Amino acid sequence: MLSVNDLMTPIPDTVTPQTTLRQVIEVMKAQACRQLPVMQDGKLVGIITDRDVRLVMNSPLIMHGRWQDEEILDTITAESCMTPDPMTVAPDMPAYQAANMLSTYKFGALPVVDNEGLVGIITVTDFLNYFAMQQPEAIDQRD
């Protein structure tokens, strides 16, 4: 049976609660990812997504000029906009159960934890990539 371990990205890049939004964006761009686990003292304390960053930068509740964006990027930290204590999955969980969780809760990713340690992250993209690889000849025939 296909497990989370078969599809996950092992040992993902992480940030700390004190990481600024500018640094979060830099890591996301460099790693071509949209979600980052937030770690403190070796423990998973949250997850921050590109959506979290966009909400802070483009909040309709806070009117600000573009010149203030630089200050926001350098002063707002991951801790202030992350989802704390995120839902997690185990590496040996059947992949279909993780897919069901992603779908049910409308998450883009779930941190993968084993013995209280972060070992990976599984994303909607991981499932899409797996699905796309199942019938590559069918995709080639459309071209």
Image: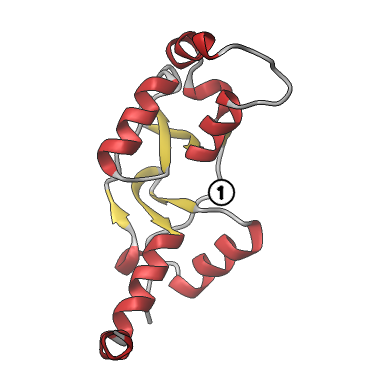
Image position of 124 (left or right of 62): left
Judged from this view, the residue extending furthest toward the front is 143
Q: Looking at the image, is 75 positioned above or below residue 84?
A: above
In the rendered image, which quarter is residue 86 located in? top right
In the rendered image, which quarter is residue 32 located in? top left
Q: Looking at the image, is 115 positioned above or below residue 66?
A: below
- Frontmost residue, 12 versus 29: 29
Rendered residue at 47%/52% (across/down): 109
Rendered residue at 50%/51% (across/down): 88
**Residue 92 horizontal/vertical position (percent):** 39, 66
Q: Looking at the image, is 6 positioned above or below residue 76?
A: below
**Residue 3 horizontal/vertical position (percent):** 38, 71
- Frontmost residue, 75 versus 87: 75
- Frontmost residue, 99 versus 85: 99
Rendered residue at 48%/52% (across/down): 110
**Residue 33 horizontal/vertical position (percent):** 35, 45
Task: State the SS at label 1.
Answer: loop
Rendered residue at 44%/71% (across/down): 95
Judged from this view, the residue extending furthest toward the right is 61
Q: Looking at the image, is 58 positioned above or below residue 109?
A: above
- Frontmost residue, 135 versus 112: 135
On-image quarter of the C terminus: bottom left
Q: Residues within 10 Å of mark 1 (few under 14, many from 20)?
A: some
Residue 11 visible? The answer is: yes
Residue 94 visible? The answer is: no
On-image quarter of the N terminus: bottom left
**Residue 17 horizontal/vertical position (percent):** 45, 22
Residue flagged by tag 1: what amino acid is it?
Answer: Met
Image position of 81 (left or right of 16): right
Image position of 119 (left or right of 65): left
Residue that label 1 marks: 87
